[in-house]
Amino acid sequence: MAAGSTLWHVKGGNYLVPKQLLERLLKQSDVQFVQGHVKSVEEVHRVDADDQGGNVRLSYQPTNSELVHSVDYDFIILAFPLHRDNINDVVVQSKDQLFNQYNYRMQSTFANFLSGQLNCRNYNLTNDECERLTAIFYTNPSLGYRCVAQQKPVDQIDKKLSKKTEQTIYKIFSPDQLSSTDYAQIFNDGTFQLTQSLPWLAYPQYEHPQKLPPIQFNENIYYVNAMEWSASCMEIEAISARNVAMLLTKRLGVQLKHTDKHVEF
Amino acid sequence: MLLLSIYDYQDNGRTFDTVEEFLKMLDNDFYSATQKSFRKYLFEKGFNKRFINELGQMATLVNYDQSVDSINAFPG
């Protein structure tokens, strides 16, 4: 159990991590990179034993193309979440009858960014306490919002807070779209202005007992995001990606080179 | 950190075939944690109602936008 007002972040945007990984991969090996939307992944059943074709068929629509391409591969690794909301966009066909995409849902959350001054009178705070207030966590699940957190530039190293103004930016998480009435409960009247409101499928909707998707659909189709249904964070995704890479190298009988250095934080 | 032992396993070439196997590999308690609500889990561990309603609830609402009653105990 842990909670904080800052999230894992990279200057310029977290998308730079996969982007730069890809750029390095393209430089260091002869991989082919194709951009497009995956439509389906299915097993290929070969009648002729001498047939040297791949075992799994990937159908995808390249960006800026109307045509769907189909290519056979030896192995396919899926690295995006399969759930009820994308059930019509991606079809995965395999022997594993235990996986029903319909049973898995994502939690939709709004990330709202606003400038303004927090309504500290709500909590009877002194001016000094109000100045030091950088995050509010709400414990009542029937409220329309979950938390408020002051936002700072990612490269602000100075631990001492700069004085708050009406331009100070806050992020509010909410399960549904919020209205001005909601914001007026958090900020002083007339001080707040909405900058951005983004709905996103942030993490799985958990349940108990928890259904857990398979890491392997069949001998040739792997699913990295299965692990997200244990817990959803960057660390789990990285562990899962490494596990799938190791499963595949074991399967192929390839010896893995240990090039990564152990770093203590 | 709870996940730390996985790095030793992975450094030594150990893999897991299912999410369940991963959880059991780390700790016997982790898989069973996915089978019950976070509220029930904390209550069984001896935490009182106020701790669960304030600190437990806060952690799951902030991190996952889900309550201690709907979420299972492993993400919690």
Image (cartoon, coloured by chain):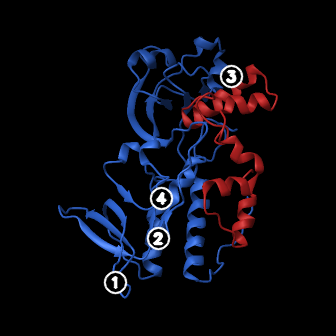
Chain colours: A blue, B red
Q: Is A120 located above or below residue B38 in the figure?
A: above
Q: What residue is pinned by disc 3?
A: B53
Distance Cα–Cα, label 4 vs label 1: 23 Å
Q: What residue is pinned by disc 1?
A: A48
Q: Is A143 located above or below residue B37 in the figure?
A: above
Report the mark closest to the observer, 1 or 2. Answer: 1
Q: Residues within 10 Å of mark 4 (few under 14, many from 20)?
A: few
Report the mark closest to the observer, 2 or 3. Answer: 2
Q: What residue is pinned by disc 4?
A: A96
Q: Name the subunit of mark 1.
A: A
Placement of the C terminus of chain A among the 4 image quadrants: bottom right
Labels 4 and 1 touching (C-beta < 8 A): no
Q: Name the subunit of mark 2.
A: A
Q: Name the subunit of mark 4.
A: A
Q: Quadrant of residue A135?
A: top right
User: Going from the N terminus, do you reach mark 4 or mark 2 first?
Assistant: 4
Q: Is residue B8 left or right of residue A53?
A: right
Report the mark closest to the observer, 4 or 3. Answer: 4
Residue drawn 38% across and 20% down?
Answer: A179
Q: Nearer the viewer, residue A83 or A176?
A: A83
Q: Residues within 10 Å of mark 2 (few under 14, many from 20)?
A: some
The amino acid type found where label 4 is placed reads Asp
The amino acid type found where label 1 is placed reads Asp
Where does the image place residue A239, in percent across and percent down from the top left? 62, 60
Placement of the N terminus of chain A among the 4 image quadrants: top right
Q: Name the subunit of mark 3.
A: B
* Same-chain check, marks 1 and 3: no
Q: What residue is pinned by disc 2?
A: A220
Q: Residues within 10 Å of mark 1 (few under 14, many from 20)?
A: few
